[in-house]
Image (cartoon, coloured by chain):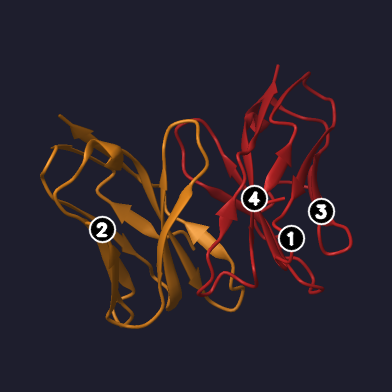
Amino acid sequence: GAGVSQSPSNKVTEKGKDVELRCDPISGHTALYWYRQSLGQGLEFLIYFQGNSAPDKSGLPSDRFSAERTGGSVSTLTIQRTQQEDSAVYLCASSLVGPTGNTIYFGEGSWLTVV
Amino acid sequence: QQPVQSPQAVILREGEDAVINCSSSKALYSVHWYRQKHGEAPVFLMILLKGGEQKGHDKISASFNEKKQQSSLYLTASQLSYSGTYFCGTVSGSARQLTFGSGTQLTVLP
């Protein structure tokens, strides 16, 4: 596709359930990022994939959060046993290579509400 | 390490100028500037790479002082469409991932 595609665009889930959020980056982009944005807050880094290198997971808030990137393209962010504080917009982004000197393109986000 | 942005919010009239600052405690490789409107994804404005480099398009420009680990975004003769939250993102250290500041909410009034 022309841009970064995320699904679902909106998700309402019950506390304690697992959710999966999908990101389809721009074709050919080797770098993929996940950020979280709570209402009215900044962009919180979660995880960064660069090519075949081990991902930088330093931003994942707890072991309930995990992400994988299959075939160097599509990525899935999984949140297990969701809590109300997980409610936020989850933004995926991609760039041609790493972020130094390269434009990062964001998707529209997946709005997660935990009730 | 999250960069620090200032001010947190600014309100100005159409045609006025504004400056948004971004600073880091770590050596920076690059600085990115994005604007986000309510309910939308962040949109890229510009990247700065070198010490003292300046860039700009239309009436928005930015500078990057590598030695001071600071960047500033300059909005001149602001337009209503400039309203939104501005984020600076920095790449520093060995991790080379992009970390964003907490944002500056800019409101341009007619």
Mark 2 sits on what residue? B58
Chain for disc number 4: A
The colour chain A appears in is red
Indicate which label's residue lies in the foreground, 3 or 4.
Answer: 4
Is disc 2 on the same chain as disc 4? no
Distance from disc 3 to disc 1, alpha carbons, whole Å, reads: 10 Å
Verify CB contact (< 8 Å) between mark 2 and mark 3: no
Q: Are marks 1 and 2 on the same chain?
A: no
For mark 4, what is the residue?
A3
Q: Identify the subunit bearing mark 3.
A: A
Mark positioned earlier in the residue sequence (3 or 4): 4
Q: Which mark is residue A27?
A: 1
Q: Nearer the viewer, residue A12 or B54?
A: B54
Mark 4 crowd level (few <14, some 14–19, many ≥20, 10 Å Cα): some
Q: Amino acid at mark 2?
A: Asp
Instruction: Determine the colour of chain B.
Output: orange
The image position of residue B25, as x and y in percent, is: 39, 70
Q: Residues within 10 Å of mark 3 (few under 14, many from 20)?
A: some
Tell me where residue B36 appears, x and y as whole percent.
43, 42
Q: Residue A85 at what x, y percent from top left?
A: 64, 29
